[in-house]
Amino acid sequence: MLFARLSAQSAQLPDPRVSRPPVMTEVPADTRRTMAAQFNLSILLAALQQGDVATINALARDVSWGPTDEVTRQSGGCSSLGDAVTTLKSRSGPDSPRILFDLRSSRDSSEAIVLSGLLVVGIKGSSKVQSAQLVLDPNRMQWSRIDGFLTAFCSFERPLWRSK
């Protein structure tokens, strides 16, 4: 019975010797651009979670900051996303911070792809939720504007751990 079911499933698979385009090329262009923006977001989030300052600074090197983050930058200590992660890690102690992005909407135009959502940063039972927005330049496939990230990372004012 199991063998018959597996045989039936394998009959539905395409012939591996036949060349075919990847599935991604079959979706509309704006959907591909949005998928690419979400992929870039996942790369940024992975670097943030790992505390990889070199990668973070490379991904955000030409970024202009939104109004929320500009205020945070002026207050000092968090002039870049790399500085913000370093500050956060120093305040979290031995535990790695949890960083999540709840994507609420995406808009695509020929000039920019805008991802909006909630950034959640958690350390040792304490968490901050911040509205955030990222703008990707589809021609360069690099972030051109970020807002909310510096504010979320730099809002932890004191160490949230105690050494024993």
Image (cartoon, rainbow, N blue to C red):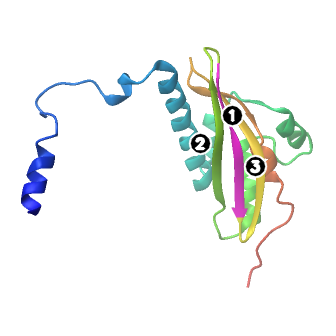
Which of 70 and 121 lies nearest the eye of the viewer?
121
**Magenta stretch holds residue 116:** yes
Identify the disc placed on residue 84. Answer: 3
Compared with 114, 7 (above or below) is: below
| 91 relative to 8 in the view: left or right | right
Whole-percent x, y for residue 158 in the image = 85, 65
Asked if the residue at tag 2 contacts the one at tag 1, i.e. Cβ–Cβ closer than 8 Å, the answer is yes
| Residue at 71% over, 62% down | 122
- Crowding around mark 1 (Cα neighbors within 10 Å: few <14, some 14 to 19, many 20+) is many
Which residue is under mark 2? 44
Whole-percent x, y for residue 30 in the image = 52, 21
Which of 159 and 152 lies nearest the eye of the viewer?
152
Point out the stretch of residues depicted in magenta.
112-122
Which residue is under mark 1? 134
Compared with 154, 107 (above or below) is: above
User: Looking at the picture, which amino acid does disc 1 mark?
Assistant: Leu
Cα separation between marks 1 and 2: 11 Å
| 85 relative to 31 in the view: left or right | right
